[in-house]
Amino acid sequence: MASASLKEQISNWRVSSVLNRDTSSFGKQYLLDGSHETCWNSEQGTPQHILVEFKVPVLVDKVSIQFQGGFAGKATKLIDLGRKADICPLYPEDNNKLQTFVLPKHEQCVDRRRIKIQFLTSTDFYGRIIVYSLDVHGRVAEHSETTLEQSRQQDPAGATLESASADISGTVIKIE
C-alpha cells in the first residue's frame, strides 16, 4: 500500500507553547489547516515540541514540515511516545521550503499511536519555532499479525531488520 497523508487519522495534537499565549493568531490549529498564511509560533526558549496522536495505529514513513526561515528547528528529533524511544534525528534546513524527512526503513514498520517532534534548539536566537505546515505520511497499520518476514519483503536487504523481533500476539514489530 502506498504512503499517504495521515491527517485524517490524527485525533489530537499539542504544542509546547504559543507566542504570547495568542492561540487565535498562532495556535496549534494552524499546523494542519493547509494555509500558507497561518502558522504555529512558539514562545521563546528551548526545547519546544509538537505532539501528534493518532486514532488508530499507523506506520509512519515520513514527516513534512515547513518552517519560517530564521525560526527553524536546529537539533531536532522524532520520538515514539508509546515506546518512549527516539525514532531518529531530523536535520532541518533554515529556510521557508517544505522539508520532508524520511524515517529509516526499520522504523517504518513499527506501529505508532503517538509521536513527538522535539526541537532541542532553534535557528532563532531566542529559541522560537515557526511552522506553517506539518504533515505525517504513511499508512494505517493492518490489524493482522505483522511478522519479521513481511517486513523483510518490504526491505529485501534486511540488513537493518536482523535485530528485530516480532511480537506475534499483536501487530507490533519491536526494534531492539
Image (cartoon, grey):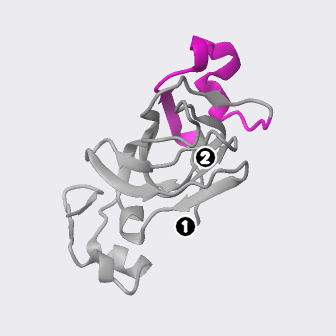
Placement of 168 over or under 50, stated as above or below: below
Asked if residue 133 can be seen in this view, the reply is yes
Asked if the residue at tag 1 contacts the one at tag 2, i.e. Cβ–Cβ closer than 8 Å, the answer is no
Q: How busy is the neighbourhood of tag 1: few (under 14 within 10 Å), some, or many (20 plus)?
A: few
Asked if residue 142 can be seen in this view, the reply is no
Instruction: Name the residue beneath numbered marker 2.
Output: 135
In the rendered image, which quarter is residue 1 located in?
Answer: bottom right
Residue at the limit of the structure toward the right, as seen here: 37
Instruction: Name the residue beneath numbered marker 1.
Output: 1
Answer left or right for 170 relative to 17: left
Disc 1 residue type (three-letter): Met
What percent of the width, then of the height, locates residue 89?
41, 56
Placement of 78 over or under 150, stated as above or below: above
What percent of the width, then of the height, locates residue 73?
54, 44
Placement of 28 over or under 21, stated as above or below: below
The residue stretch that appears in magenta: 8-36
Residue at coordinates 29% horizontally, 62% vertically from top-left?
145
Nearest to N terminus: mark 2 or mark 1: 1
Figure label count: 2
Which of labels 2 and 1 is toward the front? Answer: 2
Placement of 19 over or under 172, stated as above or below: above
Camera-side residue: 79 or 52? 79
Residue 176 among magenta residues: no
> Which image quadrant: the C terminus?
bottom left
Camera-side residue: 42 or 145? 42
